[in-house]
Amino acid sequence: YTPMPNPAALTEEFKNIVGQKKVNDEVDNIQLFQVQKGYVDYFITEDKGIKEKAKKINLTGKVLSIEDGLTLLKKLHYLVIPQHPLLEECSVREVESEIDQPFFDSLREGYMAFNDWFLKCSRENRKCYLLRVENKITALLIYHREKPSSHGLPNISADVIKMCTLKVDETVFGYRLGELFLNKMFELCIRSSVKYLYLTVFPHHVHLINLLSKYGFIRDEFTNKEGKTENRIIKSFIKPLKINETNSIISHPFYTDNGVNKFVIPINPKFYYTLFKDGSFRSKTLFDATESSLSEIEGNTISKAYLCKSKSLSMKKGDLLLFYGSKSIGSIEPIGVLDEVIYTKDINLICEKVKRKTVYSDTDLSEMANGKKDVTVLIFRLLYYLEKPIKQKEIKLLESYNNKFQTITLLKETDYNSLKQKKHFDERYIIN
């Protein structure tokens, strides 16, 4: 091993706190002391004794297992582009030959130099997400990472991601594809440590502007090179120090886990694979590029709905939801935040609240509403998927697992903290 130059000398106070009975303890303590002093960033070890000592001095976040160390390195140095089974993620170069398709006509009408600009995107190897239906492009998002010298945004001296072109064809309106694109961009900003996401849009695109404002984008006007008024709409991904309104949608995808309850929500694989299409437990299928898959709108959205007959009166807005895929899945992977909870048998109210957010058909909803019990309706936002899902073996060790998570279950705070210490939750999203 390469020796560490000028290590900090071990103090008696430190030895008394962590304990030092044997010669081996001294070696361990010297290494651990360098972490406490801040001379090294992380200590990778499988030694249980060292990990126990790390707990005594609140260094569990710095003393990692080999598996956690590899996960950390991937986060720091290996960018995985967010995926979704409906979307292709590719270079603009791969679609350059399709520039004459009718899909691009409206873009040419709005910007006379569109073809030249598109070819420039191809030369620069810009990336895009696109949706094909019957092998034709029906939705497209071109994005690009820009340096301060390129974007020229006021008071922003860091790299940003620009959504350069966003178009959804009329044939696929209503499938919440704008929300799907936004979700992938949010995830990309977090993964690539980019602190700002922006786009420019003309004022008549009211629906898009409203959607962006809902998720915390800030808007201002400017005059473009052609003398036309445009809106510049920016969202900051600088994690706030606190959230004024508990886990408000404006702060999405950031959230706090302080002062809120945590619930485990069981979901059958049949519904899980539709509601959480981009989770790791669902494989791509031959039918993903078909209209049938596209029409499963609840798999495209950030805002989703969960319905059941189980009732937990302690649930409130801002609570965290850990979705447990039952049976063959046997794991917790999606994390959500509760926006609204309703207990009702009013079918009209149910349909209004869950429209385009649920796996259930209108017939299913009617049958649920006709029962003796109220229907529990949870409207929630998907925050992210755990990179290290909580598997069945670990779930069985939780105190909260008495009912085998067959119904909505309040997760004990001790269980949550234990899972958090084991690095299951992504600190990049959490406001402590």
Image: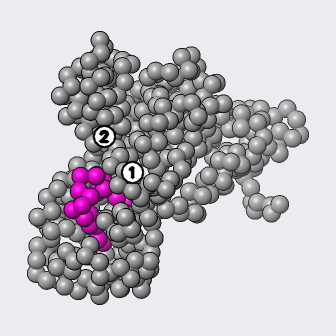
- In this view, which residue lies farthest toward the top? 372
Is 180 included in the stretch rendered in magenta? yes
Residue 168 location, x and y as percent?
26, 63
Place residue 194 in its image quadrant.
bottom left
Residue 63 x/y as whole percent: 67, 44
Counting residues from the start of the chain, the first of labels 2 and 1 encountered is 1
Q: How is the image coloured?
A: one colour
Residue holding disc 2: 357
Residue at position x 54%, y 17% in the image: 403
Whether residue 131 is visible here, answered yes or no, is yes
Number of the front mark, 2 or 1? 1
Residue named by callout 1: 293
Q: Nearer the viewer, residue 3 or 232?
A: 232
- The percent coordinates of residue 227 (x first, y second) are 10, 81
Label 2 with label 1: CB-CB less than 8 Å: no
Looking at the rendering, which quadrant does residue 356 occupy? top left
The three-letter code of the residue at mark 2 reads Lys
Residue plotted at (71% across, 33% down): 52
What span is colored magenta in the figure? 162-185
Label 1 crowd bin: few (<14), some (14–19), many (20+), radius 10 Å: some
Secondary structure type for disc 1? helix
| Residue 182 forms part of the magenta stretch | yes
